[in-house]
Amino acid sequence: MPILSLAILALDVFMAVHVIRNGKTCWWISIILIVPLIGSLAYFFVEIFPTLDMKPQPKVVRMQRARWQRAQADLRQEREVSGRRIEDVIDTGSINEKIALAEACMARELFGDAVRLYESAREGYFVNAADVLIGLSRALLEHGDFAKCRQTLRELGEAHPSSFAQERAILTARALAGAGDFATATAELETLLERKDSLEARRLEARYYFAEMLWKQGLKDRALAQLTEVVRHGKLFNMTEEEEHWVTRAGEVQAALR
């Protein structure tokens, strides 16, 4: 029995690491940890199995391995070039170049580099520019610097009270939750959801993260109800691309949890 338990634990750890490294939705980690073995098997058959080639021929395998090795070499070279370019842009780039490269770093999950680029853009006339501050807030949140994220959001609110109001509320709630203050975080999102003038995409985003926070607090029924509301929106209304993004994410999580 101890050997079997260790094997299941090892499998769960492996699958959780796979989730993180491959950028899968964070809900999978909860499923794997809450339902040992079954959660890992569900993750394997939903996310990994469909990508496997069940009958690869030796030549195909060699070609795939060669492509993978070339891709890794290209990625290493790209990182070296990107690293040098980031330093150059920080030192001598224009504000637009810094913001553009910071957004590219965000897309590639290079959150620390994005923080540095946004911070370097806070100079002169642009020290409190709204697009720089909101970008920096996003980067700090993803980088895990929750306290500094909230401070930057406060600076944004003071300098531009009417700019990014809904997104500020969502980011503030996520930063609070990241620091462990779920009560204040959920209250922040509930306030946003009660407003009738919020953009629908922001309401869907807020409801999605509200569900995530409820789930992490063990309020599973309420979390599933919130996800159902997001999915229901997609069935009733024509959607913008951004609304569709949140409906799709909610649907994927809902299916995985049931």
Image: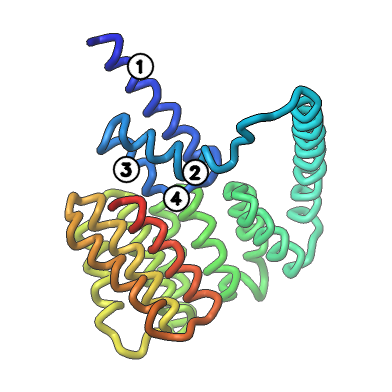
Q: Which comes sooner in the sequence, label 1 or label 4?
A: 1
Q: Report the residue at 18% width, 50% height from top.
A: 218
The disc placed on residue 150 is none
Callout in the foreground (1, 4)? 1
Give me the C-alpha separation between circle 3 and circle 1: 19 Å
- Work out whether 180 lies above or below 52: below
* Circle 1: element type: helix
- Picture coordinates of residue 109, whole percent (x, y): 59, 49
Rendering quarter of residue 172? bottom left
Query: Which residue is identified by label 3?
Result: 30
Instruction: Specify whether 47 is left or right of 115.
Output: left
Query: Which residue is identified by label 4?
Result: 25
Q: Which comes sooner in the sequence, label 2 or label 1?
A: 1
Q: Amino acid at mark 1?
A: Ala
Q: Amino acid at mark 4?
A: Thr
Q: Nearer the viewer, residue 189 or 243?
A: 243
Query: Which residue is identified by label 1?
Result: 7
Query: Which residue is identified by label 2?
Result: 47
Q: Which comes sooner in the sequence, label 3 or label 1?
A: 1
Q: Report the residue at 76% width, 47% height from top.
A: 87
- How packed mark 1 is, by other alpha carbons closer than 10 Å (few <14, some 14-19, many 20 or more), is few
* Circle 2: element type: helix
Q: Nearer the viewer, residue 165 or 233?
A: 233
Q: Report the residue at 66% width, 58% height from top.
A: 102
Q: Which comes sooner in the sequence, label 2 or label 4?
A: 4
Give me the C-alpha separation between circle 4 and circle 3: 10 Å
Q: Amino acid at mark 3?
A: Ser
